[in-house]
Amino acid sequence: MLFTLTCVCQPLSSLCSYFPYNSSSIKSVGSKVPSFTPEARESGYHIERGLEFSTGDAFFRQESATGRDLGVLAASLHKRDTGRLRILDALCGCGIRSLRYLAEAGADFVAANDGNEEYGSTIVENLSRVSGVEDGRWVVTHLEANRVMMDYYLQKSFFDFIDVDSFGSDSSFLRSAICTLKLGGLLYVTSTDGFSSGGHRPHHSLAAYGAYVRPMPYSNEVGLRMLIGGVAREAALLGYHITPLFSYYAFHGPVFRVLLRLNRGKIHDSRHYGYIGYCHQCGNSHEFSWDQLGQISCSCSTPKVSNSLVVSGPLWTGPLHDGAYLMDMLNLAKQWGWIGCDGKDSLEKLIKVMVDESDPKLPFGYIKLDEMASRAKINSPPLKTLMSAMHQKGYAASRSHIETNAIKTNCPMTECIKIAKELLKVSVA
Ligand SMILES: C[S@@+](CC[C@H](N)C(=O)[O-])C[C@H]1O[C@@H](n2cnc3c(N)ncnc32)[C@H](O)[C@@H]1O
Ligand SMILES: [Zn+2]
């Protein structure tokens, strides 16, 4: 980064001002591992991937376990590939992620921070289950997230992996997170702002992520692109660029989570950062580059002004995931026995759909079959049938992990309607 790329394992003493506890009080908590009775479990003890932990009074969502699984797999791959893993969990809640990064990903060191001091004893209790504080593998702090990140940055104490699990569209953490991340490091960031991604607060998304977002049928994918675009902009400002490794949308919340790698150097190419348009008249979507501003229209209304076209941006228009990286994550999940044991909404199914979505021929967005059926005034053929017909006609098409009854494809809506109608004729005959 700005100062050094070497791994800096800072002495605890240099960070003493972070501690609401003195080190002796941490030691005394760390040396005792509580045993959990069934009654205790009912009052806030949980198990995730076999690890027992307490949530105390901290904010905790069981449904976010998949997002935590994905983060742990990525962190572990980073350790495997680079031989080191220093993690900053900037908004750690009860410390479940920190615990999992230590226990499962084999983190060398985790800085677990949450602004709420009242969670302190719960976080310490949870991390003490992996190692005592005297081992120096973790510290707990209660600072404002920007403060903790900037303090580490000012001490040239950089991290391989930073997890920013914030609420809403709080993008104020992005710059300090990028400053505090090593080059080649991984940034795992969140937005839970479904109003902005849905296009209901364009001035808010503009302030938070620099993107004026309008309502679009694939708004949950737009939410991921708005977040990636926001990080790409902050990274460029600091002289870096990012590569998305995976992008994950979850209905609960909603939660938009993206894992990005930080790379040296600005990219003087805005191919993956631009505008997207959706035409209400024909249902087709288009990507517009910066040099097309002022000439934006849909071919269904050329040469007239397309009043039917809504445009959002600038946001990330490039790939949401790196397919090869996702395959590595899937293989690791298999090695760890995480596959084949979690039923219908399995991690395996999720990662496999994400791999399919990584086809570079697939543009942004997806076609919702309900929308297609209502435009065509038909009942939609089954998703699988429609997808294989698209493949036969040479289009790229995959399921979407975001929307179950939708197809991600480079086939325009107008063509999709034709294919669906042809299929129905075949099946009627
Ligand atoms: C979504 S929760 C974290 C959940 C946790 N990562 C997990 O997986 O269970 C967000 C946490 O951020 C903390 N928080 C909110 N604003 C903060 C800030 N500005 N600085 C530090 N912590 C903050 C809250 O106390 C809360 O525990
Ligand atoms: Zn049109």
Image: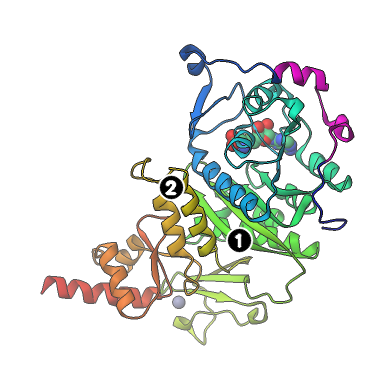
Q: Where does the image place residue 54, in percent across and percent down from the top left?
A: 57, 23
The answer to which of 277 and 146 lies nearer the viewer is 146
Q: Do the residues labelled 2 and 1 touch (CB within 8 Å)?
A: no
Lateral position of residue 134 relative to residue 73, left or right: right
Secondary structure beneath dot 2 equals: helix
Tell me how far mark 2 sits from mark 1, CA to CA.
Answer: 19 Å
Where is the N terminus found, in terms of image quarters? bottom right
Report which quarter residue 382 is drawn in. Answer: bottom left
SS of the residue under disc 1: strand
Counting residues from the start of the chain, the first of labels 2 and 1 encountered is 1
Q: Is residue 429 left or right of residue 354?
A: left
Disc 2 residue type? Leu
From this view, report whether residue 408 is shown above or below residue 121. Answer: below
Q: Coloured how?
A: rainbow
Q: Is residue 29 above or below residue 9?
A: above
- Residue 347, labelled with which disc? 2
The residue identified by callout 1 is 244
Q: Which of 62 and 14 is in front in this view?
A: 14
Name the residue type under label 1.
Answer: Pro
Q: Is mark 2 within 8 Å of ligand 1?
A: no
Does the segment drawn in magenta span residue 21? yes
- Name which residue lies at 74% across and 76% down: 268
Q: What stretch is highlighted in magenta?
A: 10-29
Residue 128, given in percent of the width and then of the height, sits at 66, 24
Which mark is in front, 2 or 1?
2
For the question of whether residue 198 can be seen, the reply is no
